[in-house]
Image (cartoon, rainbow, N blue to C red):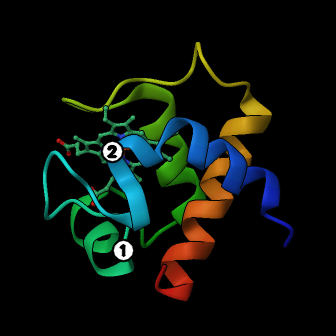
Amino acid sequence: VDTSNGAKIFNANCASCHIGGGNILIEQKTLKKEALSKYLENYDVDSIAAITHQVQNGKNAMPAFKDKLTPQEIMEVAAYVSQQAELGW
Ligand code: HEM
């Protein structure tokens, strides 16, 4: 899958808090596979859908992106995060 556009969207909107797949605000809630599996609801059922839900709606200190990114952009960034989690960032 070509996730180069997802990478650009990630760098512009997510890397401020999630640089390198980390989390500067809540250090254990990273975007690494083990953390996603542990903390992100339904990640093991459907990783893309679970990431999409979090990006659309936000959670606690993470802002919602549904009014900032298009559905296509959210799909692309979710695919990128899922791929990077599989690759180990
Ligand atoms: C959690 C993705 C932008 C702050 C998460 C999680 C994902 C995610 C998948 C779940 C991680 C886990 O539970 O281990 C993204 C994407 C972003 C983005 C794709 C861009 C579109 C941001 C930004 C901030 C932020 C800009 C900071 C202002 C957080 C925080 C959590 C979190 C604090 C933990 C939420 C909680 O469970 O309390 N993010 N994020 N995120 N993100 Fe983001």
Q: Which quadrant of the render holds ligand 1? A: top left
- Of residues 39 and 16, which is closer to you in this image? 16
- Residue at the (36%, 30%) spot, across then down: 58
Image-quadrant location for residue 82? bottom right
- In the image as oriented, which residue stretches furthest toward the top? 67
- Report if the beta carbon of the residue with label 1 is closer than 8 angstroms to ligand 1: yes
Instruction: Write the residue at 73% across / 24% down.
Output: 70
Q: The disc labelled 2 sits on which kind of residue?
A: Cys
Q: CA distance from mark 1 to mark 2?
A: 14 Å
Q: Which SS class for mark 1?
A: loop
Tell me the quadrant of the picture where the N terminus can be found: bottom right
Horizontally, is 57 left or right of 11 in the view?
A: left
Could you tell me which residue is drawn at 56 percent across and 87 percent down? 87
Label 2 secondary element: helix
Pointer 1: residues within 10 angstroms few (<14), some, or many (20+)? many
Mark sitting on residue 32: 1
Disc 2: which residue: 17
